[in-house]
Amino acid sequence: MKITDYFEKSKGQTLVSFEVLPPLKGGSMNDIFETLDPLMEFKPPFIDVTYHREEYVYNKRPSGYYEKTAIRKRPGTVGICASIMHRYGIDAIPHLICGGFSIEETENALIDLNFLGINNVLALRGDARQFEDKFIPETDGHKFAVDLVKQINDMNKGIYLDSNIEKGTPTDFCIGVAGYPEKHFEAPNFAIDIEYLKQKIDAGASYIVTQMFFDNTNFFRFRDACEQAGIHVPIVPGLKPITKKYQLSSIPRKFFINFPDILVKEMMKTEDKDIKKLGIEWCISQCKELKAAGVPCLHFYTMGDVDTTYKIIEKV
Ligand code: FAD
């Protein structure tokens, strides 16, 4: 079923959904099941599975020189989606990125998804590779997520890259895109970032999932700005509880978000052993307020931490 149909059918009730990361290469599908099995109690209609492009690693050769190799540390996104759908009978949403894909490879990946009965996809640009200071698309790949959305939307109309295909079978993908309550770090300002987001919706995306945030006022400001810009699709807040003190600096560094003053001050004076409890309480109060404000779904970046996610949802 399409993700937007779940939102329509829920008739104003707030759903919950989860995002999981493929295990590191050499890991097992059980790592995913161990995260998801206990969370099924909350009847998520769908699970997102992230996509991780190849990264460069430097291996020391016997000569002393370093050899640069590209490896994918977390492969398996599509297989995990199929496996989740098979085990739990719910929808799985693969994340599809522009980085590392030519448009032809993107088309073939979408054909695989379509044949597998996966008809939801989160369309993203992806980040720069490690050791590269900006995002570099493949020579014949997409530069921005909006271009990927356009390609998927074309396939939904039966338009494939090969112009010799006259009556291509239309796919039926429901397309989600990313939104940034505190603006994407590369965008010159908040208003322009919203304009680009609007382009993704106009190109055929039907819902938005946000980057994590810890201050709901940022989410509400973002939601209002979307409304004013003529973006009227469901907006799903992405949530992640803080569980360790070092995340006060690692999360802003990685995700370009800010922590509210009051949370930082509380965290600073809390002993390490009590940080997780405080993070859970903060996230519960965020969730309660978001639910009261009518969000269609609370989307949790589980990062494999079942215990924390469980404790939050059972209170919400
Ligand atoms: P875009 O929408 O293309 O935007 C990228 C930047 O370009 C923004 O600054 C935007 O303002 C600007 N821009 C957009 N369109 C134009 C234009 N036409 N002209 C000029 N500038 C423009 N990454 C992964 O690698 N794998 C994942 O699984 C993954 N999952 C994610 C899930 C969520 C919910 C979120 C919020 C992010 C996820 N990311 C993932 C990270 C994401 O790939 C990065 O944040 C990336 O830097 C931007 O992706 P985007 O799709 O928002 O890009």
Image (cartoon, grey):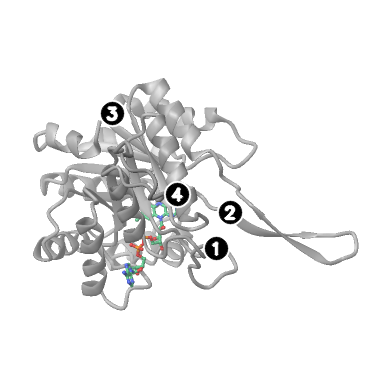
Circle nearer the N terminus (4, 1): 4
Circle nearer the N terminus (2, 1): 2
Which of the 4 image quarters holds residue 60?
A: bottom right
Name the spot of residue 193 as percent of width and height, x first.
26, 69
Local crowd size for mark 4, using a 10 Å CA cut-off: few (<14), some (14–19), many (≥20): many
Q: Is residue 134 above or below residue 47?
A: below
3D distance between C-alphas at marks 3 and 2: 34 Å
For badge 2, the amino acid type reads Glu
Local crowd size for mark 2, using a 10 Å CA cut-off: few (<14), some (14–19), many (≥20): some
Q: Which residue is drawn at 35% across and 39% down?
A: 18
3D distance between C-alphas at marks 3 and 4: 33 Å
For badge 3, the amino acid type reads Phe
Q: Are marks 4 and 1 in contact (CB under 8 Å)?
A: no
Comparing labels 4 and 1, the label whose residue is closer to the camera: 4
3D distance between C-alphas at marks 2 and 4: 15 Å
Circle nearer the N terminus (2, 4): 2
Name the spot of residue 230 as percent of width and height, x first.
11, 61
Q: What element carries label 2?
A: loop
Q: Are marks 1 and 3 in contact (CB under 8 Å)?
A: no
Residue named by callout 1 = 129
**Residue 307 appears anywhere in the view:** yes
Residue named by callout 2 = 54
- What numbered label is drawn on residue 106? 4
